[in-house]
Image (cartoon, rainbow, N blue to C red):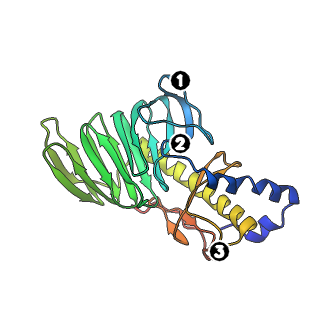
Amino acid sequence: MSSLKSVLGCAPVLLAGLAILPQAQAGPPPPGAINYVEGHVTVDGQAAVAGEIAMVGPGQILETLQGHAEILLTAGAFLRVAENSTIKMDAASPKSVRVELVHGEALVEVVQVDSLYSLDIVDKGADARLERDGIYVFNAEQPAIAVYAGKVRVEDDHHVISMGKGGELELAGDGALKPRKLNRTETNPVYSWSRGRADYDAQASEWAVESLMALNGASKYATGWYWNPWFKSWAFVPARPYQVSPFGYGYYAPNASHYMAPVFGDFR
């Protein structure tokens, strides 16, 4: 991690700017916040933008025509939508987050499971509950759910199946759920794009933590989302002092040992 001394040694103007960051703690974004937009993306037919108050609300539809989008779900969970794909935010209540993949592909990276919420992704009528930190890929065109890391519980009208790392579930047209082994060395464009975003999100988190330390010290913080005005995105601060994301990037809390070097790697 960057040296804290380099942050504290900056001009007073910079430290004044740091005060913007913790204000987000009083009003962190609800599930559905649009964290990043690339290319042509719409929400209910209107051009989508990313920002501190940009949202996909319950019942709304986000479409990526020639672009990508990153949506925040529960604290520590990122939904990344591939090109030419459509998602619908079904529910974002205090206890449940539920998103339907209507068309195309999407990936969910869960850095930390939020025990206050249930997190479900619906793909062609199959409800997948994400139960652990991990990387989950959903395809609505050749309906399937792939688990590169983590654990998922999938339920439809007739079956319930639990599946862990290295598993893939074909959502057959006859209503059957057909598990098979996933070749985790093979990836697709949404996986590659998400890996780049995972790197960026981890860096945004590192800057956010440095800011919290400069202002409040190591003890006064809460896990969750913090608005990072320099990265122009929300940053996740984990509950654990040090945590490696499913893509292999280091996340720190303000009370972590800052002598530990960041980790960068794809942990498939």
Q: What kind of residue is marked 3? A: His
Q: What kind of residue is marked 1? A: Gln
Provide the residue designation for mark 1.
Answer: 46
Mark 2 crowd level (few <14, some 14–19, many ≥20, 10 Å Cα): many
- Earlier along the polypeptide chain: callout 3 or callout 2? 2
Percent x, y of residue 231: 67, 48
Q: What kind of residue is marked 2? A: Ala
Q: Nearer the viewer, mark 3 or mark 1?
A: 1
Percent x, y of residue 213: 70, 68
Q: Is residue 202 left or right of residue 207?
A: left
Mark 1 crowd level (few <14, some 14–19, many ≥20, 10 Å Cα): few
Provide the residue designation for mark 2.
Answer: 33
Of residues 94 and 46, which is closer to you in this image?
A: 94
Provide the residue designation for mark 3.
Answer: 258
Locate residue 104: give its quadrant: top left
Locate residue 258: give its quadrant: bottom right
- Earlier along the polypeptide chain: callout 2 or callout 1? 2
